[in-house]
Image (tube, helix red, strand yellow):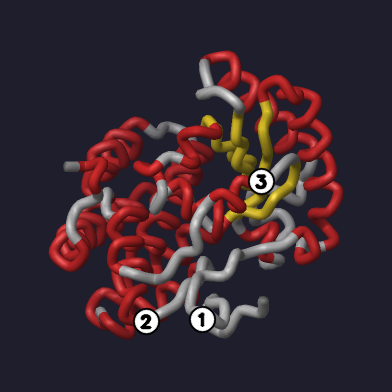
Amino acid sequence: MEENDRGLRPDGTIAREGSLDRVGEAFVPVVAAARERIGAVFGPDRLHSAYLYGSVPRGTAVPGVSDLDLQLALHHPPGPAERADATALEGALDTAFPQIDGVGILLSGRRELLSASQRYDAGFFLACLCTPLIGPDLAEQLPRYRPTSLLARETNGDLARLIPGWRRAAAGAVTGAERRTLARRVGRRLVRTGFTLVMPRWGGWTSDLERSAEIFGHSYPRRAGQMRRAAATARRPAADPAALGPLIDDLAPWLAAEYAAVHGVPRRSR
């Protein structure tokens, strides 16, 4: 079914983002290599299915700027061997293709992705934000989702627990690459949290960072400038620690408190 301009199907549920048909020409060989190498490294005994997410399957990736994001669903919970293999694969793909700036591979067990406790977090992520790349699509075993306060709470309501770790990472980052990686992660999470804070009243879904910041700014004009900076940081992260400080020390604590007041605390954080 077609989606409307708010990312919804005609029945009001959130349409799945992305498609292999939307992958830009520059990234087609990257995706092909990822498919081949994932299958070779993990094999059918460990891998149930693999998915793309982020700007590449949405068709908005910029050569030399965007990264490649992958979600692997394993038959069993990932262990040290699987994490080491994923790290090595991230490095190999990043080195081989200059059109991507970094590779991130998420590892999850199949049962966890389908569990009731993850229904509105990892389950939603896989069903609506991931594009199938290898194997059976687990989204067929998950429900359709609507832009509700429940979804907002369970997907991004745990921001408060991340802030201490961000502060430690910022204090310990010594290289430009480490700071850029952290800046991208922080910027993305703040924009997505800001968007899902207002998602139910807006009545739709988007993963576009600039659009998310704009939608947030309509409801919180006094914080609009900070959220636009967070979106810019996510898109083009800087190594300057001074650029990250205000996001972690001012915007993030305010956003966590406002989120809890509006939507409550996720079940897993209680």
Q: Which mark is residue 87?
A: none
Q: Residue furthest top?
A: 81
Give the mark nearest the N terminus, 3 or 2.
3
**Which residue corresponds to the image point at 19% horizontal and 52% vertical from the top-left?**
265
Residue 267 vs residue 82: left or right?
left
Structural distance between the alpha carbons of marks 3 and 2 = 28 Å
Residue picked out by circle 1? 6
Q: Quadrant of the C terminus?
A: top left
Residue 165: percent from left, percent from top: 29, 36
Mark 2 in CB contact with mark 1 (< 8 angstroms): yes
Disc 1 secondary structure class: loop
Instruction: Name the quadrant containing residue 197.
Output: bottom left
Q: Secondary structure at mark 2?
A: helix
Inter-mark Cα distance, 1 to 3:
23 Å
Question: Could you tell which of marks 2 and 1 lies nearer the N-terminus?
Answer: 1
**Residue tagged 3:** 51
Please give the name of the residue rendered at 80% of the width and 36% of the height, measured from the top-left corner.
96
Question: Please, what is the three-letter code of the amino acid marked with disc 1?
Answer: Arg
Q: Label 2: which residue?
A: 202
Image quadrant in which you'd find residue 135 = top right
Asked if one can make out residue 168 in the rendered structure from this viewpoint, the answer is: yes
In front here: 167 or 239?
Answer: 167
> Which kind of residue does numbered mark 3 sit on?
Tyr
Amino acid type of disc 2? Answer: Trp
Tell me the CA gap for discs 2 and 1: 9 Å
